[in-house]
Amino acid sequence: MKTNSVLLHIKEYIESKGYVFQPYYIDSLFLGLKSQSFVILSGNAGVGKTSLARLFAESIGANPNNGRFLRVSVASDWTSPKPLLGFLSPDGNYVPGKITDFLKAASSEPQLPYILCLDNFNISRPEHYMSPLLSALSARQKVLGEVVPSIVCNRSDYGKDNAANLIYGDVSVSDNVYIIATTSCDEVAYPISESVLDHGFVVEIENPDITVKFNRDEKNIETLPLEEIDNSFLVPEYFTSADCDSDFDYLRDISFDFEAFNKIIKHLPSPLGYRSRDALLFYTAYSRRFDVFNNDSLIDSLLMQKLLVRISGVTTNVKNCLINLFQQCLKHESKENEYPNSSYKMYSATMKSGCKYPRTAAKIIYMLRRFEEDGYATYWQR
């Protein structure tokens, strides 16, 4: 099946289950997984983040029954990778982690996608327990046309447990493993560090329309040929910026756009670096190839998912960054006497001037309003 047909099938399948997510969320989830194999779904509790992860997986044939979808609820006491990848007990026996068998099974079926959902993933610090996984995802490389996976458990991890050594051997994160993490960012959650954000994309799910919509179509979504949706749908094809040079002029122009945005936030602690630059280019190349977003929608999506998530703080520098970024979102620059330096003026400016990047503009207004009311700007809803 062609990529656009699969995306349409995913949207129809999810709607047939009683959920109506904006196409933007599904397209963004696809492009994020294709680009970096790791997506964070954020939003208020109950907006359907975990359901979206599960239904997306089901729609491409990955479910708990066949072992290709695994949901893991993160616990608040996870301070190391041991709960996920396993550890040696005091008596010297290896105790498998929650995803050890999942990763091993994925390696045995490289032609099929395996999706791991980490629920409430920042109720513990993700950089502590996810570090080997994130490093493995970013360390993938292609050698002689083949993707070389990164090993997260090797034979030395089993100590003298020969039985575990025989069963598991080297456990790697193969290129058919994708991670969807969910976060509500409530008062018990930890902030998501820039090092984690660098490794994936953030898709924020807004509060849904909760009116019931029944699918009266007689077509049975379940009967679509799922066997045709193999790992080629999600597998990453680009590993360095040099890999996606077939559309050089367009990608170069996008990089110029984001360098301009990056200069606005250069005085903040964490402007965009090379890993994020490459992820932006991969996302752009896939979107262009599969005709997912037009140019403005693409930039709007990337600003939301990669740049705004990095902005937080209490200083006037943070406020000025938001104001300058907002000015770039407008179709026409505001006059000096109407300069949008408050959330109210920003809202008025969107009504008068219109927006090239409406999602980003709306989020900046939210962030600046938080700054005005609470003295602290943040992307994350609380």
Image (cartoon, rainbow, N blue to C red):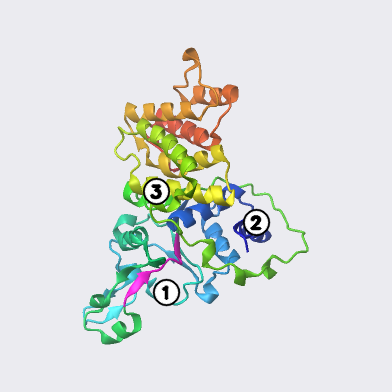
Residue 229 position within the rendered picture, expressed as x and y whole percent measured from the top left: 58, 67
Report which residue position mark 3 lands on.
Answer: 278
Using the rendered view, name the quadrant where residue 331 is placed: top right
- For the point 41% across and 30% down, which residue is it? 322
Check contact, mark 1 vs mark 2: CB within 8 A: no
Residue 25 position within the rendered picture, expressed as x and y whole percent measured from the top left: 56, 50
Q: Looking at the picture, which amino acid does disc 2 mark?
A: Leu
Q: Is residue 206 above or below residue 93?
A: above
Report which residue position mark 1 lands on.
Answer: 107
Q: CA distance from mark 3 to mark 2?
A: 27 Å
- For the point 75% across and 64% down, which residue is it? 219
Using the rendered view, name the quadrant where residue 272 is placed: top left
- For the point 30% across and 87% down, which residue is it? 163
285 lies left or right of 128 = right
In the rendered image, the quadrant that contains the N terminus is bottom right
Which element is circle 2 on? helix
Q: CA distance from mark 1 to mark 2?
A: 28 Å
Which element is circle 3 on? helix
- Kindly report the secondary structure that dominates the magenta region of the rendered protein: strand
Q: Looking at the picture, which amino acid does disc 1 mark?
A: Ser
Q: CA distance from mark 3 to mark 1?
A: 26 Å
Report which residue position mark 2 lands on.
Answer: 8
Answer whether residue 185 is visible to the viewer in this image: no
Residue 344 in magenta stretch? no
